[in-house]
Image (cartoon, helix red, strand yellow):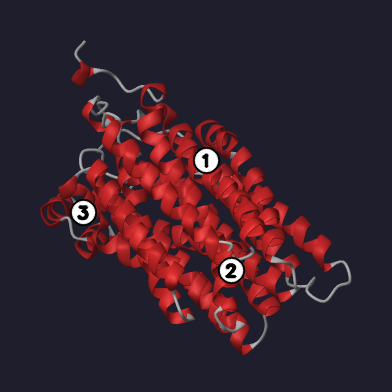
Amino acid sequence: MSTEERPFSLRSVALAAFLPTLLFSTGEGAIIPIIPIAAHNLGASLAIAGFISGMIMVGEVVGDVPSGWVVGHLGERKAMIWAAVVAIVGVLIAVVAPNPWVLAVGIFLDGLATAVFALARHAFMTTYVPIHYRARALSTLGGVFRAGWFVGPLIAAGIIQLTGTAQSAFWIFIIGCLGAVVVLVTVEDPAAKFVRPAKAGGHGAAAPTEGAEQAAERTSGLFQTIWAYRGVLVRMGTGAALIGGLRATRTVMLPLWAVSIGIGESQTALIIGIAGAIDFGLFYASGQIMDRFGRGASAIPSMVGLGLGLLVLAFTHDLGARLGWFIAIAMVLSVANGIGSGILMTLGADLAPQNKPAAFLGAWRFTGDVGNAAAPLVVSALTGLASLAIASGVMGVIGIAGAVMLARWIPRYVPRKPRPAR
């Protein structure tokens, strides 16, 4: 069998498929807990610090608009290389930022880069991974992102302890991006090795009308694709947005809560890094759950756990043991997030057309990233208008509502047994 005709093997592409993602996500993980601290150090209020933290998610939403086109026209490897370059520019702006608003610009650029980088790897896995272990493959990809978000804060904690400044953690992202570029340039592109598996598409539930699908393929534009697949995106996409929103709330809420109750910078990075280890440790279990018991068996418990965790957190701010409560809830939120590892990528892959997935996946990621972007802005607004505890409680209620929505729509659009293609 020739190189071009080999069947897919996850092991044979692990280096090229996963190492750039690990390097990129390690750098991103290093800066995420530090963003509100860096903003606070530049004079931002707690509400403004939350807003600036949310700019990375806003950047991802904006980046989703051209990401399908970029990946479709440049190819996955070139798109990832250029995304890493844009991320480096954003980090350099953040490093030299004289005020919170310049910092926000740099963080926004990093969000743009993250959208393209993540979509490129997602598109490859959707196209080439056979459906019978799709969830395990995509949860492994999600686990690689989580590994970076685990390792990054721990490295950041050590660097901050050595240098005495939170800004030094930004250089970890620069090193990670440079490492990702080196791997992408020197290692053979995995997309050149394999052919698409026959009949390896989704469950058939997301298929638009034939004319709509042709329109989406002709334009490859985000908003045209959203219109072509509007039925599934209104229903399942709303659920994806709520999943993204709860995850983003956790990402922003924990460092903001730490600032609010007076935990030090290196301590905050260490606690979030340990929580990230729990999150990372569950990625393969999540894939096994999805492949054996269906997608809802992962998504619904994850949303319930995130919602309840944020609700409980809302009542602990002024307790004498608030540090202990903070650590315990951070771990609970990580367990809840970990059992949902890869769920958005897996659902997107299930619903996407197999031959040209990039446009649909760009639209799918856009819906999830709208939640990613909106949640920190809601947290910031509620914190400014009321308090951080109120913000946590409101987002907890939204999480429970999202679990109910997913329980209704996942069985309809992604049944446990694949439907025949239509």
Q: Estimate the spatial distance between the alpha carbons at disc 1 and disc 3, rounded to whole Å.
A: 25 Å
Q: In the image, what residue occupies the spot 33% across and 52% down?
A: 84
The answer to whether 420 is drawn above or below residue 376 in the figure is above
Farthest residue in the left direction?
218
Farthest residue in the top direction?
1
Q: Would residue 273 appear left or right of 83 to someone viewing this image?
A: right
Name the foreground residue: 371 vs 31.
31
Nearest to N terminus: mark 1 or mark 3? 3
Q: In the image, what residue occupies the spot 23% across and 52% down?
A: 359
Q: Position of residue 160 (x, y in %)?
A: 62, 59
Q: Would residue 153 appear left or right of 411 to someone viewing this image?
A: right
Nearest to N terminus: mark 3 or mark 2? 3
Q: Looking at the picture, which amino acid does disc 2 mark? A: Ile
Farthest residue in the right direction?
320
What crowding class fits label 1: few (fewer than 14 Cα within 10 Å), some (14-19), or many (20 or more)? Answer: many
Q: Looking at the picture, which amino acid does disc 1 mark? A: Gly
Q: Looking at the picture, which amino acid does disc 3 mark? A: Val
Q: Are marks 1 and 3 in contact (CB under 8 Å)?
A: no
What crowding class fits label 2: few (fewer than 14 Cα within 10 Å), some (14-19), or many (20 or more)? Answer: many
Quickly name the residue at label 2. Answer: 398
Q: Which-is-in-front pick, marks 3 and 2? A: 3
Quickly name the residue at label 1. Answer: 143
Q: Quadrant of residue 44?
A: bottom right
Q: Would residue 303 appear left or right of 67 to someone viewing this image?
A: right
Q: Estimate the spatial distance between the alpha carbons at disc 1 and disc 2, rounded to whole Å.
A: 25 Å
Q: Position of residue 166 (x, y in %)?
A: 59, 65
Q: Quadrant of the N terminus?
A: top left
Q: Position of residue 117 (x, y in %)?
A: 34, 50
Nearest to N terminus: mark 1 or mark 2? 1
Q: Is residue 58 visible?
A: no
